[in-house]
Image (cartoon, helix red, strand yellow):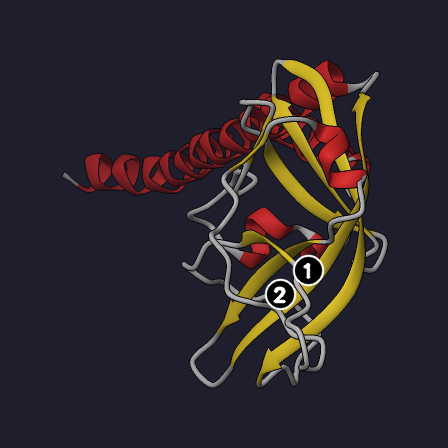
Amino acid sequence: MNIYLKILLIFSLLNITLALENKDFKPEDNICNSLYHVFKTLPFKIEGESFNDCSIHDRNSYLSCKLSIFNHKIVQFELNKFMDSGNCNFDNCFVTLEKPYLTIFNKEKNKKDIVKEKEIIENIDNLEDLNKDKLFIFTVPYITESNYCTKSYIIRNAQFKYSKHFFFSYITKILNRSIKILIILLSLKVLRYFLNKIQKPKLDNTKKES
């Protein structure tokens, strides 16, 4: 077997292995990649820090965001469904360019429970504020060509966690991307090799005839 084919086979198997190891959650649960591509950070800061790589896990039961790929600090919230508005006749996430936002739930006097329009919260000074009596509402807009819907969640039990495998996870992602690039390059190399093999007899025959 040609050396390029052997290398290509090895990298292909390695890529499949890494892909299986990285299957932590369903594609539709990934709030950053499936729900929207423009906003990849939590739409509010916590104690002045911005958290990235947000994803909703376990059938929308909790939201988890990382501080950065080089830091193992994670913030996690429990999500409790609050209400839907608009045409929400779908289950999966869709791409939207609208940013999720955080507000506080209020009861207006002499009226049924409604969310009074409040200023969007951009920073939480202390994580413990999210665990007090006030109800913080995390609203996510879903948009498609035929649907417009917003889903709101009450966020509770906010806490910081520290991942033990953050560095390994980061290295794995880099390796996975690098291997995909190498597979493409090797595939082109193998294709060129076979094209040369095909063209060489033709050139030899042409020389003999001349």
* Residue 134 seen anywhere in this rendered image of the structure: yes
Q: Looking at the picture, which amino acid does disc 1 mark?
A: Glu
x 44%, y 39%: residue:
191
Q: Is residue 144 left or right of residue 202?
A: right
The answer to which image quadrant residue 16 occupies is: top right
Spot occupied by residue 100 in the image (x, y as percentages of width and height):
53, 54
Quote the CA–CA distance across marks 2 and 1: 5 Å
The answer to which image quadrant residue 206 occupies is: top left
Q: Is residue 92 left or right of residue 200?
A: right
Q: Which mark is residue 28?
A: 1
Mark 2 is surrounded, within 10 Å at the Cα level, by few (under 14), some (14 to 19) or many (20 or more) other residues, namely some
Mark 1 is surrounded, within 10 Å at the Cα level, by few (under 14), some (14 to 19) or many (20 or more) other residues, namely some
Q: Is residue 182 left or right of residue 109?
A: left
Badges 2 and 1: C-beta atoms under 8 Å apart? Answer: yes
Spot occupied by residue 85 in the image (x, y as percentages of width and height):
60, 79
Figure check: 9 above or below 93:
above
As helix, strand or loop, the secondary structure at mark 1 comes to helix
Q: Looking at the picture, which amino acid does disc 2 mark?
A: Cys
x 71%, y 74%: residue:
91
Image quadrant in which the C terminus is located: top left
Q: Is residue 41 left or right of residue 169?
A: left
x 50%, y 36%: residue:
187
x 57%, y 40%: residue:
42
